[in-house]
Image (spheres, helix red, strand yellow):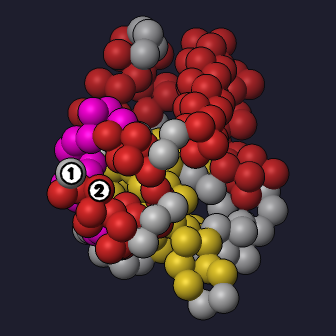
Amino acid sequence: MEQLLSHFLGKGIPQSELSRITESFKFKKIPKNDYFVQEGKTSKYLAFITKGVFQYFYLKDGKEITTYVTGANAFLASLSSFYKQKPSKENIRALADSELWIIHHDDLTKLKTESNVFRTFYIRAMEDLVVAMDETRTNLIILTAEERYALLVKEEPDLLQQIPLQYLASILGVTPRHLSRIRNK
């Protein structure tokens, strides 16, 4: 709970509002290789990761295509499934034993309605997410695989140590063999 509290305090949530907000979250453990969200099922929870690493991926022609990997101190959700409350098109799986603080969709909706402080936090968080997604999309179009790898090394060196090479290669849009050549440079 300390990491969740620190995150909210660091984002401008006053101490007086913390207990009201955090009581909506429940602790959950997810073992390695278990799913947080599975394709075809509706995502009912948003989570804050306190321990672990998660892989976002699609299955196409029997192959996994990893689109994103995230770790501790980040929020976790199948966004379109969670916000539209429709079946997910993606899978989210734990790559390590993980610990989360989860909030149900209905509880999040209630918090956004009842707490101006939380609503302001939430809007800022969504804006940050949109900007990050736009930067990722732009980087995929403009940067080479080598440049995208260098950016990951610069911005998320700790996470890179936790991601298996085949998933990292998939995120970069290259084969594991090509990724090995990039890393050797």
Residue in view at x 68 percent, y 27 percent: 112
- Tell which of 176 and 41 is nearer to you: 176
- Tell which of 164 and 31 is nearer to you: 164
Seen in the image, is 131 located left or right of residue 93?
right
For residue 37, above or below residue 120: below
Residue in view at x 57 percent, y 24 percent: 128
For residue 17, above or below residue 136: above
For residue 109, above or below residue 68: above
Residue in view at x 40 percent, y 64 percent: 169
The secondary element bearing badge 1 is classed as: loop
The secondary element bearing badge 2 is classed as: helix
Q: In which quarter of the image is residue 131?
A: top right
The answer to if 157 sits in the magenta stretch is yes
Q: What residue type is labelled 1?
A: Lys
Seen in the image, is 140 located left or right of residue 49?
right
- For residue 185, the mark is 1
- For residue 182, the mark is 2
Magenta range? 151-165
Q: In which quarter of the image is the N terminus?
A: top left
